[in-house]
Image: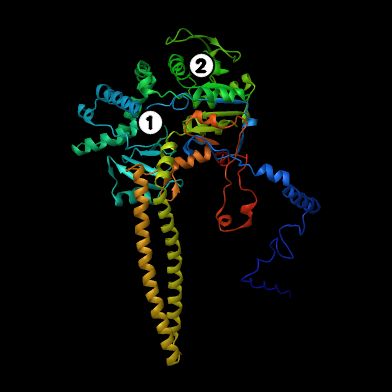
Amino acid sequence: MSVCPVSPKLSPTGPIPGSPTTSDPLHGSFRSSRNRAHAEDAERRAQSLFADPELARLLSVPRVLPREVPRARDIFVNRNLRMTSVELIGFDMDYTLAIYHMRRLEQLAYDMTIAKLVSERGYPSVIGQLQYDHHFVIRGLAVDKANGNLLKMDRFGYVGRAWHGLRPLEREVWKKLYRNQRVQLKNPQFAWIDTLFALPEAWLFAGIIELLESLGQRVDYGKLYDDIRDAIDTVHRDNSLKREVRKELGRYIFQDPELGPALHKLRSGGKRLFLLTNSAWDYTDAVMRYLLDGQLAEYPSWRNYFDYIVTLASKPAFFSEQRPFLELETAGPGEEARVVGEAAHLERGKVYQGGNLVQFERQTGYAGEGVLYVGDHIYGDILKSKKSSLWRTCMIVQEIEDEITYTDGQRERIEQLSEVEMARERLDDAVAHHKGLLNALDRRLDRGELTAEEQAQLEEERRKTKVELDKLRWALREATEIADTLEREVEEGFNPYWGLLFKEGHENSRFGEQVERYACLYTSRVSNFLHDSPMQYYRSPRELMPHEMAGSWSAKLSLVGSEGPPKGERER
């Protein structure tokens, strides 16, 4: 009768038997590389390369020259991008090429939406007394239409902050609703505030709930949100908002003197440019003339900057539906264009509306990673284009400038917070270690069978360990309270209701995670491209896993990221 051999005991210090580093690997590992000779030759060449004195002199010059613009104006990289591979660059207009004066535009949209809610939706005129608070809302919030709450989540979907009306949600209610469930934004119960023009609707939702419930009225939260959404969509859809903006473009839109030079620099670097906007021609023409006409002598009209101009694109439908391109006959400034007919080709100098991704790539001859699209809308511009095409993406997040400038000003406090956090980590480990020592001493004392001298020695050691443990526990509580206070001060100094835009607690916020997943690049304004070469190779820092951050040498294999599939593509 055969006897099954007993497996050897695992070594406390050696690897698991059968691993690639043992003498008898089980998983097909080679004891030596098939390319060992090539590798040894490469090592010799590396030594020669680094010993070259002339090369060392050339590399001693600083790689990055001093810049005249602040760090907040940098272009930040999630996925490596070689601009030499980009042939065509597209731009959204609103909140991308055109940077709005948010305080004034939000107030205008808010006032017009309130008027529609009262006149067309039957809401009491008392809501007109609400005063819009620009600071209360930020991008990246979620609306819980079932429970009437505004939420801010971290990258895991965990709700870190919640407000009902204009008050923090009670802790017990928060725990009951959100502690044991992940917020799934695909669920129709939730709406995602992911654009700047959606900020007034979030405040209206909270403000009206606060007012009506304080008056003892019952609120149908879902209907309220849908009414607000429809009213604010109407003022955008019927052009009533844009008609008001057009009357005073200088009041609502900033002129960026670096925008024209930035576009010119890209064109001079061999790039072709296109405009892809959801706005109609008459508004597009008015805004673009205000932004670009007269900036550079080489471009007598803003249209000269762009090889293709597409209006009323209906993004995100542009990326997924099959609407035809319609050629427009443009009239004088401020006049509506006339549809000539369906376009057979896209030509420079002409204007189109509608269209779709497939036809655009076919008719322009540019596709995939040869196209870079720059927009501000995480869903309509970035996520949808990423999921429907291989276009590279750059997201405009103008709030970056505020957040970086603010946190730079908080440097000393943040450094102190970091120091306290590291101390808390060490204290936590020390407490666990002393608890283990105390438990071991208790077990030895409980077993008995000790001489009087051993008993006294162990009891004294236990007493000292207990005193040290009490000290460490006190220090841990103190460090935790200090860290929580400093963290709250830093976060609420930026926004007293929601904290930092890109962070939620110790994690990236849901909004920050979306930017990281779907945008190859992100920056605060289009004109930031002026300060980089059109041939720039944008490199991202390589993402490390926890075991690599703990010291694994695989962390040294590459310090920069790759041009491989973006994070958002991996889950498709």
**Which kind of residue does numbered mark 1 sit on?**
Ala
**Residue 231: where, in percent of width, then height?**
33, 25
Q: Which residue is mark 1?
A: 198
Q: Which residue is mark 2?
A: 302
**SS under mark 1:** helix
Q: Is residue 321 visible?
A: no
**Residue 505: where, in percent of width, then height?**
40, 49
In the foreground, 205 or 563: 563
> How was this image coloured?
rainbow
Residue plotted at (44% across, 91% down): 453
Q: Is residue 78 left or right of residue 216?
A: right
Q: Is residue 47 left or right of residue 116?
A: right
Mark 2 or mark 1, which is nearer the start of the sequence? 1
**Residue 298: where, in percent of width, then height?**
56, 15
Cα–Cα span, label 1 and label 2: 28 Å
On screen, residue 449 above or below 257: below
Query: Quadrant where the N terminus lies?
Result: bottom right
Q: How many marks?
A: 2
**Residue 256: where, in percent of width, then height?**
45, 25
